[in-house]
Each structure stands twice: as structure tokens, then as C-alpha cells.
Image: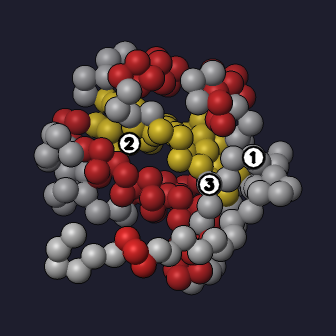
Amino acid sequence: MSTFDEIIKIRRSIREYSDKEVDDEDILKILKAGMQAPGSRLGAEPWEFVVVKNKDTLKKLGEIKPRVTNAPVAIVLVGNIERSFYKLVWQQDMSAAAENMLLEAVNLGLGALWNGVAPEEERMKQIAEIIGIDDITTLKPFCIITVGYPADGWENKFMDKFDEKRIHYEKY
């Protein structure tokens, strides 16, 4: 386990993975990290997760989001609007869960990639159909996080992105 300071600095979008299988225990740790995210109100967290390992399903998801095809695992984050306290900000809650999951993947020595789905309605409907959701009125696919061991040439490593010119005090 690395320190949080190290994890947040080295996290990168990993777009290619080795063939090594991801342990179910690690997937569970990533899911638990997502559920530890802050929500707009305690007990009203909208997140649900669909874990996909089946190669045929990954291929179908990859027809919509190409980076999913070669991942050993994809986790579809689904916002359950009925459980969301503030119905118009469910995507903020889902984003917090997704970031926790990305950081936990790094903590476990894995790579991960956030593949955006929402708010594009057609893409949300296509993903929903693949994972067995009939209607996106209540259950809304938000994003797909691919997870795996980084392929050669892909790694989580530090890149200094700090830019002091983007910081403003008191007023813009």
C-alpha cells in the first residue's frame, strides 16, 4: 500500500492492459472504495455497480466505448435516481465514487480508466441495454471504469500538472 500522497500523484489513465486476471478480492476493494465516497446526503448515495468480466459483454461495451474491449474487467457505474437526495446532482455523487475507485485501483497496483457515458442519452441507453437495464428513467449508466494490470509501456507515474497561474484568491 502506498501513501495517499503518492497514489494521487501517480494516478494516470491506463488505456491498455496485460492479460493477467484481476483478483475478485481486489475488485471488491475497488467497489468498497466507491461506496465510501461522499454523497449529497448520508444514506441517499445513488451508486450501483455492474461488474463485467465476460469477454462477449466487454466486446459489446467496446463497440460504444472502444477502450473497454481489451480490459480484463469493466465496472459500469449506475446512478439510481430514486436513491439520490438531490435529483439534479446525481452525477456529482457518481463522480466522487468513480474517483475513489480510480485511486483504489492505483493503491492495489492496478491501472484504471474512466470511460464517460453520461450525460449523452443515446450512449446511456446503449450501455443500459447491454447490462440489462430496460429504462434509463431511474437507473442511469454514468461511466465505465476499466481495470487491469497495465500493459508494457503503460504505468501509473508522476507527471507534474501543477500550474500556479490557475489559482486565484478571493476573486477571479
- Which residue sits at x=16%, y=40%? 87
Q: Is residue 88 left or right of residue 102?
A: left
Location of residue 120 in the rendering, given as x and y in whole percent from the top left corner: 38, 27
Q: Secondary structure at mark 2?
A: strand
Q: Amino acid at mark 3?
A: Ser
- Which residue sits at x=45%, y=58%? 99
Q: Amino acid at mark 1?
A: Glu
Q: Amino acid at mark 2?
A: Glu
For the question of whether residue 124 can be seen, the reply is: yes
Q: Residue tagged by mark 3?
A: 13
Q: For this rendering, which residue is in front, 155 or 85? A: 155
Q: Residue tagged by mark 1?
A: 16
Front position among marks 1 and 2: 1
User: What coloring was used for the rendering?
Assistant: secondary structure
Location of residue 32 in the rendering, given as x and y in whole percent from the top left corner: 45, 59
Q: Residue tagged by mark 2?
A: 48
Q: Quadrant of residue 49?
A: top left
> Taking 134 as reference, is 57 above or below it?
below
Q: Quadrant of the C terminus?
A: bottom left
Disc 1 and disc 2 in contact, CB within 8 angstroms:
no
